[in-house]
Image (tube, rainbow, N blue to C red):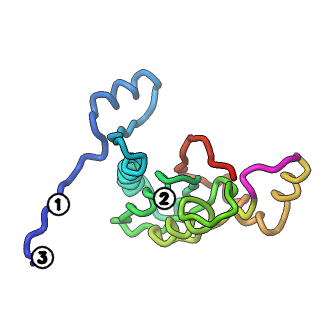
C-alpha cells in the first residue's frame, strides 16, 4: 500500500581498499569503483549512479561541467539529485557520432544534465569527426560554436566515457 519504504544507502564506491591501492599506485586523488554486471546496461547504470553521487559532492555553485557521450554519461545525468541545489552550466565535449537522435549524446544529454543542475546547457553542433583541418577550423570559428567553445577554458569537472564509438 506504499506505507513502508526501504532505502539502501550505498557507499559511493565498492571495495574502498582497492580504490586506495589504485590511488597510491597512480597518484590519484580519488577512485570510484562500480560493480560490473553481465548486462552492459546495468554496468553503465552502476557507473552512472556512483558518478552522480560524486558530482553531487564536488560540484559547487557556478561550476561548469563538461559532458561527453555514452550510456554511463546518460545514467549519470539520470541519477543526479543536486541535493545542494547548485547552479552548474553544462558544456558538450564531443560532437555527434550518429545521424539518429539518442539520449546518450548531443543536445538531449546536455539538456538532461543542465535541467538537473539548474544551469544552462551549451551544445556542440558539430560532428564527432571531420575529414580535414580546414573543416575543423571553420566549425570552431563559426558563430554557432563560439559560445560553447569559449566555455572549455572554464571547465571545473568533466564526465566522459572511454570506449569505441558506434559509427554509422
> Residue 41 or 76: which is nearer the viewer?
41
The magenta stretch is 127-132
Name which residue lies at 42% across and 54% down. Answer: 55
In whole angstroms, how far apart are the C-alphas of marks 3 and 1?
13 Å
Q: Which residue position is annotated with label 3?
A: 2
Is 98 on the left or on the right of 11, as rendered? right
Residue 107 left/right relative to 58: right
Earlier along the polypeptide chain: callout 2 or callout 3?
3
Tell me residue 3's x, y (percent): 8, 75
Q: Is residue 97 rendered to the left or right of residue 46?
A: right
From this viewpoint, which residue is outermost toward the top? 25
Q: Position of residue 9 (x, y in %)?
A: 20, 54
Q: Is residue 75 above or below residue 147?
A: above
Residue 108 lies within the magenta run: no
- Dot 3 or dot 1: first in sequence order is 3
Residue sitting at x 55%, y 57%: 65
Tell me if residue 11 comes above or below residue 18 in the rendering. below
Residue at the location (63% across, 59% down)? Answer: 92
> How would you rate the neighbour count of disc 2 (Cα within 10 Å): few for under 14, some for 14-19, many for 20 or more?
many
Q: Quadrant of the N terminus?
A: bottom left
Between 60 and 40, the residue placed more toward the observer is 40
Cα separation, mark 2 vs mark 3, equals 29 Å
The residue singled out by tag 1 in the image is: 7
Q: Quadrant of residue 142?
A: bottom right
Q: Real-space Cα distance between discs 2 and 1?
A: 23 Å
Q: Which mark is residue 74?
A: 2
Image height check: is 131 above or below 92? above
Which label belongs to residue 139? none
Q: Please, what secondary structure does the residue beneath circle 3 have?
A: loop
Q: In the rendered structure, which disc, 2 or 1, sits on the residue that comes first in sequence?
A: 1
Secondary structure of residue under mark 1: loop
Q: Residue furthest right?
A: 134
Amino acid at each position: 500500500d506504499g506505507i513502508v519504504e526501504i532505502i539502501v544507502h550505498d557507499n559511493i564506491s565498492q571495495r574502498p581498499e582497492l580504490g586506495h591501492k589504485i590511488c597510491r599506485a597512480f597518484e590519484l586523488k580519488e577512485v570510484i569503483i562500480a560493480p560490473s554486471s553481465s548486462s552492459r546496461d546495468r554496468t553503465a547504470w552502476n557507473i552512472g549512479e556512483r558518478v552522480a553521487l560524486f558530482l553531487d559532492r564536488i560540484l559547487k555553485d557556478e561550476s561548469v561541467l563538461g559532458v561527453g557521450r555514452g550510456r554511463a554519461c546518460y545514467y549519470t545525468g539520470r541519477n543526479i539529485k543536486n541535493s545542494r541545489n547548485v547552479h552548474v552550466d553544462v558544456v558538450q565535449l564531443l560532437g555527434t557520432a550518429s545521424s539518429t537522435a539518442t539520449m546518450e549524446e548531443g543536445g538531449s544529454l546536455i539538456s538532461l544534465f543542465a535541467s538537473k543542475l539548474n544551469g544552462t546547457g551549451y551544445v556542440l553542433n558539430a560532428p564527432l569527426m571531420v575529414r580535414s583541418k580546414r573543416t575543423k577550423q571553420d566549425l570552431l570559428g563559426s558563430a554557432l560554436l563560439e559560445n560553447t567553445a569559449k566555455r572549455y577554458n572554464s571547465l571545473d569537472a568533466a564526465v566522459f566515457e572511454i570506449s569505441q564509438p558506434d559509427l554509422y
